[in-house]
Amino acid sequence: MATTTTTTGLGSNRTIRKMALAGVLTALSFATSSVVVLPNMAPFQHFFNVITAVLLGPWYAIAVAFLTGALRMILDGRPILAIVGAVIGAGLAGILYQRTGKYIAAMIGEIIGTGVISAIVSVPLMNVLYHAHVPSLYFYIPFFIPAATFGAILGYLFLKFVQKTGLLGRLFDRL
């Protein structure tokens, strides 16, 4: 009797490895974002958004960012900004990296996606869900840009360093 193995789909080894790596990245992102918090900023969530976008692509990056934000909301008492401030940047980082193959594109996607787009999207959500009466559409930009920039630059530098060691290539080969 011949046996067959699947190479795609939920049961494939590749999918399982990607899901396992996404779980580890989510745990690391949550842990570091909960411990290293500058005044209402979590730069390590953005660090992991860039890394996840490069390693796993936009959909996994969105999932890891969402899960990290949800954990921060549930366990750390953060508002919806923990999710909104992460998923758009993670998705844009993944899309830009996927299109260009350049780490700097992922970094820029995270900074623009989180620092500008998520900041603007957050205003109506805060006004509706929390009755916050945020005075301007641009109110959150000065708060989101520093964390997104710091974290995205760290993610970029980390990827460049790991690439030079050869570990990144071996990781890509295994995914």
Image (spheres, rainbow, N blue to C red):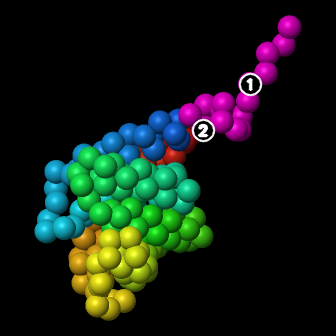
Amino acid on which disc 1 is placed: Thr
> Which quarter shows the C terminus?
top right
Residue that lies at the very extreme toward the top in this rendered image: 1
The residue that appears at 45% across and 44% down in the rendered structure is 22
Q: Is residue 4 left or right of residue 141?
A: right
How many other residues sit within 10 Å of disc 1, few (<14), some (14-19) or many (≥20)?
Answer: few
Q: Nearer the viewer, residue 150 or 35?
A: 35
Q: Is residue 81 above or below residue 136?
A: above
Q: Is residue 147 above or below residue 30?
A: below
Q: Is residue 99 above or below residue 36?
A: below
Q: Which mark is residue 85?
A: none
Is 116 included in the stretch rendered in magenta?
A: no
Q: How many marks?
A: 2
- Sequence-wise, the earlier of marks 1 and 2 is 1
Residue that lies at the very extreme toward the front in this rendered image: 131
Residue 60 in percent (x, y) is at 52, 52
Residue 158 seen in the figure: no
Q: Is residue 21 above or below residue 5?
A: below
Residue that lies at the very extreme toward the left in this rendered image: 39
How many other residues sit within 10 Å of disc 2, few (<14), some (14-19) or many (≥20)?
Answer: some
Q: Nearer the viewer, residue 173 or 22?
A: 22
Q: Which mark is residue 15?
A: 2
Q: Which residues are magenta?
A: 1-16
What kind of element bears circle 2?
A: helix
What kind of element bears circle 1?
A: loop
Q: Is residue 170 left or right of residue 81?
A: right
Residue 73 seen in the figure: yes
Amino acid on which disc 2 is placed: Thr
Residue 172 in percent (x, y) is at 51, 46
Q: Which mark is residue 5?
A: 1
Is 10 included in the stretch rendered in magenta?
A: yes
Residue 142 in percent (x, y) is at 24, 84
